[in-house]
Image: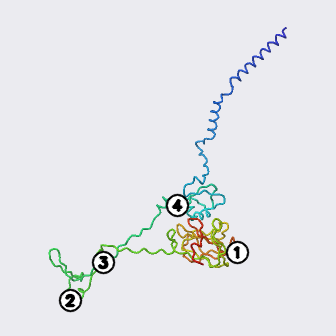
């Protein structure tokens, strides 16, 4: 009996323990679905929200969302190629975008490829103003009489003061009376001066008066929209390459694939010309050149034969040079 009683009491104790455990579990039953959804949303929001000390990472700007005058760097781009495609100097692009090293740009980076209107308006402009002409000259005898407002006649005397009378002194005074003095009188109307012509400076947009052929050889490759960006002109190594119009050299480089040693000249705010595959370049960046000036020598750099590749670009877009050059 004692053993049976002990066994029953042990069973009752185990039952109480199990009941207590089940009650504890029931008190921590899952929250309703709506409550769990709200908690999950709060967790997600907390995970996605940046901390006060950490700004959210900027997302790449899609081309469709770009402001006018901006460009997003793509794979394979260089600052030189971007400048050429937009008809600008790479120096200007570097300045507009605060680039210390033009060779360091990143894919997805947004660049300004057009000068801001505010910057253009703030640029100094030379103003030519009329300059007053020299005053008119009036002559009057040194010893002539002057009548005052009261009608009194005054006689001018030599600045040397009075001299003792003598024949020689009288002769000197008579001679002095025949001399003249100069009195300046302001002219009422100034005469404008003509503005001097600027030698070899780039002309106004779309006003290139005349183009000349950059080389004398035969055309062996024509401009083709979307395929060939200019003319290929045959020649012998060392033959001269000439500037097709007056302008300023904005790039001397070999950094563009397929161009070899090349030169870019800016003729106006609208027009550029490109001269590629040279063996030797004779000009420097920022140098002003005249139309017909020798700027390089024909070569075969990055080409299978000696030739000149020549392009004319309007607002950065290649156009057919034959529409601008005289009959060859």
Determine whether, in the image, residue 106 is placed left or right of residue 163: right
Which residue position holds label 4? 115
Q: Which x, y percent locates residue 308?
A: 64, 74
Of mark 4 and mark 3, the one earlier in the sequence is 4
Which residue position holds label 3? 136
Report how far apart the C-alphas of labels 3 and 2 lie in the structure. Answer: 33 Å
**Is 175 drawn above or below residue 236 in the view shown?**
below
Circle number at residue 122: none
Q: Are marks 1 and 4 in contact (CB under 8 Å)?
A: no
Q: Secondary structure at mark 4?
A: loop
Q: In the picture, residue 140 is in which quadrant?
A: bottom left
Q: Are marks 3 and 2 in contact (CB under 8 Å)?
A: no
Circle number at residue 170: 2
Q: Nearer the viewer, residue 103 or 308?
A: 308
Which residue position holds label 1? 305
Report how far apart the C-alphas of labels 1 and 3 lie in the structure. Answer: 70 Å
Structural crowding at the residue carrying mark 3, measured as other residues with C-alpha within 10 Å and reported as few (<14), some (14–19) or many (≥20): few
Mark 3 vs mark 2: in front: 3
Of mark 1 and mark 3, the one earlier in the sequence is 3
Q: In the picture, residue 304 is in which quadrant?
A: bottom right
Report how far apart the C-alphas of labels 4 and 2 lie in the structure. Answer: 79 Å
The colour scheme of the drawn protein is rainbow
Mark 4 vs mark 2: in front: 4
Q: Which x, y percent locates residue 189?
A: 32, 73
Structural crowding at the residue carrying mark 1, measured as other residues with C-alpha within 10 Å and reported as few (<14), some (14–19) or many (≥20): some
Of mark 4 and mark 2, the one earlier in the sequence is 4
Q: Are marks 2 and 1 in contact (CB under 8 Å)?
A: no
Mark 2 vs mark 1: in front: 1
Q: Residue furthest bottom?
A: 167
Report how far apart the C-alphas of labels 2 and 1 lie in the structure. Answer: 95 Å
Q: Which x, y percent locates residue 55?
A: 59, 46
């Amino acid at each position: 009996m004692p053993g049976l009683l002990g066994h029953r009491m042990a069973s009752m104790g185990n039952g109480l323990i199990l009941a207590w455990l089940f009650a504890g579990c029931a008190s921590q039953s899952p929250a309703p679905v709506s409550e769990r959804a709200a908690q999950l949303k709060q967790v997600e929001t907390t995970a996605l929200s940046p901390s006060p000390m950490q700004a959210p990472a900027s997302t790449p700007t899609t081309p469709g969302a770009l402001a006018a005058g901006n460009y997003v760097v793509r794979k394979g781009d260089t600052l030189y190629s971007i400048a050429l495609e937009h008809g600008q100097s790479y120096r200007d692009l570097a300045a507009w975008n605060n680039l210390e090293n033009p060779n360091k740009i990143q894919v997805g980076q947004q660049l300004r490829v057009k000068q801001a209107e505010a910057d253009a308006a703030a640029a100094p402009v030379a103003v030519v103003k009329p300059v007053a002409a020299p005053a008119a000259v009036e002559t009057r005898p040194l010893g002539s009489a002057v009548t005052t407002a009261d009608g009194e006649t005054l006689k001018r005397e030599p600045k040397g003061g009075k001299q003792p009378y003598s024949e020689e002194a009288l002769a000197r005074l008579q001679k002095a009376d025949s001399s003249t003095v100069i009195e300046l009188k302001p002219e009422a109307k100034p005469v404008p001066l003509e503005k001097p012509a600027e030698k070899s400076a780039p002309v106004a947009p779309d006003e290139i008066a005349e183009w000349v052929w950059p080389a004398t050889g035969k055309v062996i490759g024509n401009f083709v929209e979307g395929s060939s960006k200019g003319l290929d002109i045959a020649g012998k190594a060392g033959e001269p390459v000439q500037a097709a119009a007056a302008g300023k050299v904005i790039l001397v480089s070999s950094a563009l694939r397929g161009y070899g040693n090349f030169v870019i000249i800016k003729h106006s705010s609208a027009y550029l010309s490109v001269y590629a595959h040279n063996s030797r370049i004779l000009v420097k960046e920022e140098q002003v050149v005249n139309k017909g000036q020798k700027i390089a020598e024909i070569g075969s750099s990055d080409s299978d034969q000696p030739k000149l590749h020549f392009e004319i670009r309007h607002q950065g877009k290649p156009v057919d040079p034959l529409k601008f050059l005289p009959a060859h």
